[in-house]
Amino acid sequence: VPRASVWCLRAALIHLGVGFSIGGVMLAAPLLHLSPGVLRLRPLHAEMLLIGWSMQLVFGTAYWILPRFRTGAHRGHQSSAMIAVLLLNAGVLVAGGGQVIDRPDMALVGRGAETLAALIFAAHLWLRVNNVTGRAELRSP
Amino acid sequence: LGYLAASLGIGVLQLTSSTLRPILWVTYVHLLVIGWLTQLIFGVAFWMFPRHSRESPHGKVRLGWACYGLLNAGLLLRTLGDPARAAGWHSEPLLGAAALLQATAGWGFIILMWPRIRER
């Protein structure tokens, strides 16, 4: 597995664990006599599981498994994928955290970072799925 | 796939009545996102991620089965507990158990997959 995918997939697993744990705390809050304030964590729970876990796992797997170039760096510039991973994770935390503490400006910045990460990933992977150019070929991972 | 069909069915059902919608919304979302999407990811990752070792390609298979059982038990308890709570019944122990089962399944999956994601 290439380094960028390792970062992506392991970060996705961490989001899964933390996101499930936040969900568990919210679900068990009445039983544990916790303050109803814990329900304010719901946007962070959703952000971590939908973007941090599901989407990031797809990104990590796609970077690893999509067709590779015949020449040069087989998966393109790894640095742009790394930047996208960092932006995505920062975006999830800032967007989710911003909604929890009721700071729409933070949430906006976080969502912007997530969008930028998605655009970088899309640009990075575009040529690898565009087999018509003949620059990419299908190879098993 | 069963959860996908069930969630989409509940999605249709909740649209038929404004009374049912707030009761079934959370169930609909969790059946779709946890029951279908997350479980599909778990299954495909367990199958196709790099092998753990030559002797044990999928790692701790028993832990995989435990995650499967815990996740589904937790989700089913939640599917019963959420509408019950919305109807005003005392379902806190049911939902507390569901929370524990699902969180344990999530961390179990992390323990299972972490060693299989390594640089090559």
Image (tube, helix red, strand yellow):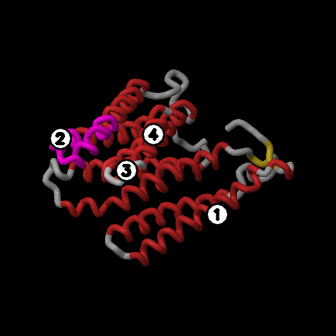
Which quadrant would residue B67 be assigned to in this image?
Answer: top left
**Front residue (pair A92, B81):** B81
Which residue is the site of mark 3?
Answer: B17
Q: At 52% across and 48% down in the image, what residue appears?
A: A9
Q: Are marks 3 and 2 in contact (CB under 8 Å)?
A: no
Dot 1 and dot 4 within a common chain: no
Left of A137 or right of it: where is A87?
Answer: left
Question: Which label is found at residue A120?
Answer: 1
Q: At 79% across and 53% down in the image, what residue appears?
A: A72
Q: In the rendered structure, which amino acid carries the disc numbered 4?
A: Gly
Dot 2 and dot 1 within a common chain: no
Letter of the chain that mark 3 sits on in the rendering:
B
Which of discs 2 and 1 lies nearer the camera? The answer is: 2
Which residue is the site of mark 2?
Answer: B93
Residue B83 lies within the magenta run: yes
Q: In the rendered structure, which amino acid carries the disc numbered 1?
A: Ile
Q: CA distance from mark 2 to mark 1?
A: 45 Å
Left of B2 or right of it: where is A123?
Answer: right
Which quadrant would residue B104 be assigned to in this image?
Answer: top left
Q: Are marks 4 and 2 in contact (CB under 8 Å)?
A: no
Left of B77 or right of it: where is A61?
Answer: right
Q: CA distance from mark 4 to mark 3?
A: 14 Å
**Front residue (pair B95, A5):** B95
Q: Are marks 3 and 1 in contact (CB under 8 Å)?
A: no
**Front residue (pair A50, B9):** B9
Segment colored magenta: B75-96
For this orientation, the residue located farthest to the bottom is A105
Letter of the chain that mark 2 sits on in the rendering:
B
Q: Residues within 10 Å of mark 1 (few under 14, many from 20)?
A: some
